[in-house]
Amino acid sequence: MLSRQTIEAFTRGERAAFEEVERTYAHVVRRVVNGFWRGAFDREEAMQEVWLHIWKNRGALDADRAQEVGGFIAVVARRRCLDLLRGPPRPVSLDDAPEPAAEETPDFAEENQIRAAVAAFTSRMRPQWRAFFDLHFVQGLPYQDVAAHLKISKLRCKYMKKVLAARARNDGALLAALSRTATGAPRAP
C-alpha cells in the first residue's frame, strides 16, 4: 500500500510518485490486461494505454483513501480495456505523458536499430499495406481516416491491422528491436 504523501505527489503529477504507483500496481494492471488480450504485442499496447489513462485521470484519486488505490486502478484498467475493445485506436498525445528522465532517452544506435527493423518489416509489404502501416501504426490515425485516405472500407482496415499485428509478432528482428529499453537490455515480460 502506498502512503498518503505518495498519492498526493502522484495527483500533483510528480514523476517519481508515478513510477512508484506503476511499480506497486503493475501486477494489477497486467492481470486485468491479460484477461482481455492474448498476444504480447496487444498486451503491451494495452498496458501503455491503461497507464496513460491512469496518469491523465490521476486527479480522481483521493489521498484519504490510499488503501483503496489498488481497487481504483483495477477498475480504471478494466474500463479502459473495454473502451479499447469497443472503439478505434486514438492517437496518443505525448504531452500528457510524464517526461522521461535523461538516462531513459533512447540513444541513436537503439533508434537506428528500431528504424532498420521497421524498414525491413515494411519493405516486404505491398504499397497499400505499407501506406496503411504508416497511417495507422506510425501516425496513429483512426480507421475512418485511414479508410478515407486509402479509399478502402473500415472493415478492410480492421483486417489489415490484424494481419500486420500477426506478422509483427512473428518477425524476430522487429520484436528484438522493439523489446529493448533505452539501456539496451531486454524488457521484462
Image: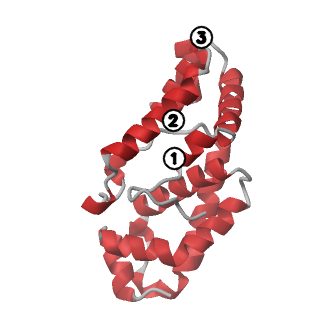
Camera-side residue of 165 and 156: 165
Q: Which residue is mark 1?
A: 178
Question: Which sits in the foreground, 177 or 139?
Answer: 177
Residue 5 appears left or right of 161: left
From what the image shows, is residue 83 above or below residue 74? Answer: above
Choose the circle earlier in sequence order: 3 or 2: 2
Q: Are marks 1 and 3 in contact (CB under 8 Å)?
A: no
Q: Nearer the viewer, mark 1 or mark 3?
A: 1
The residue at 43%/79% (across/down) is 62
Q: In terms of secondary structure, where does tag 3 sit?
A: loop
Q: Nearer the viewer, mark 3 or mark 2?
A: 2
Residue 41 appears left or right of 23: right
For the residue marked with disc 2, what is the amino acid?
Ala
Q: CA distance from mark 3 to mark 2?
A: 28 Å
Task: Determine which residue is flagged by label 2.
Answer: 117
Apparent side of residue 27 relative to residue 163 in the rendered image (left or right): left
Given contact means CB atoms under 8 Å apart, are the residues at marks 2 and 1 in contact?
yes
Q: Which residue is mark 3?
A: 151
Question: Which residue is at a point 31% across and 54% down the rendered structure image?
Answer: 105
